[in-house]
Amino acid sequence: MMLTWAGKLGTGCGPRGCFDCPSEREPACIKCPVCDQAGCDACGDSGMFEIDQCPRRYVDGFYWELLRFAKLFKRGTPPIQGGALDQEIWFLECCEFLWSEMDALTPQPIA
């Protein structure tokens, strides 16, 4: 989900449709999100997870909406009228986690 949000997977995927998605002929392989490459049933003990369709189909719409709100909140537009004090604690914690993940996916300049 974070790779798609960061534009690193399924760059043509969106709520209005998809193009340039992974397919059975040209799957995308990522490290297994369940075992972090240790090997498990989800990845067939390979440590890699094969995505052979639109990445958005793997995640419920609620989470895509949550990501959209987190992105808006980072830009200064909270999803509920009012500031940070009006936000649910779970939403603030989720935003901190998502922003941390996004920062980890953003290339850093070499000093």
Image (spheres, helix red, strand yellow):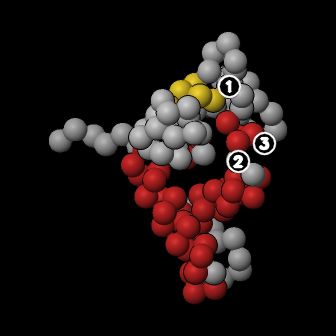
Label 1 residue SS: loop
Q: Position of residue 13 (x, y in %)?
A: 70, 34
Callout 2: few (<14), some (14-19), or many (20+) C-alpha neighbours within 10 Å? few
Residue that mark 3 sits on: 15
Which residue reaches farthest top? 25
Mark 3 or 1 closer to N-term?
Answer: 3
Callout 1: few (<14), some (14-19), or many (20+) C-alpha neighbours within 10 Å? some
Q: Is residue 66 above or below residue 33?
A: below
For the residues labelled 2 and 1, say whether their Cβ atoms are less than 8 Å apart.
no
Q: Is residue 30 visible?
A: no
Q: Is residue 9 left or right of residue 47?
A: right
Mark 2 or 1 closer to N-term?
Answer: 1
Residue beneath the point at 75% across and 40% down: 57
Q: CA distance from mark 2 to mark 1?
A: 14 Å
For discs 3 and 2, the disc positioned in front in the rendered view:
2
Mark 3 or 2 closer to N-term?
Answer: 3
Q: Nearer the viewer, residue 105 or 45?
A: 45
Q: Position of residue 96 (x, y in %)?
A: 48, 67
Which residue reaches farthest left? 111
Residue that mark 1 sits on: 52
Rendered-image quadrant of the C terminus = top left
Q: Is residue 80 left or right of residue 49?
A: right
Q: CA distance from mark 3 to mark 2?
A: 12 Å
Q: Nearer the viewer, residue 108 or 40?
A: 40
Residue beneath the point at 67% across and 12% down: 25
Rendered-image quadrant of the N terminus = top right
Residue 59 disc label: 2
Amino acid type, callout 2: Val
Q: Nearer the viewer, residue 37 or 56?
A: 37
Amino acid type, callout 3: Pro
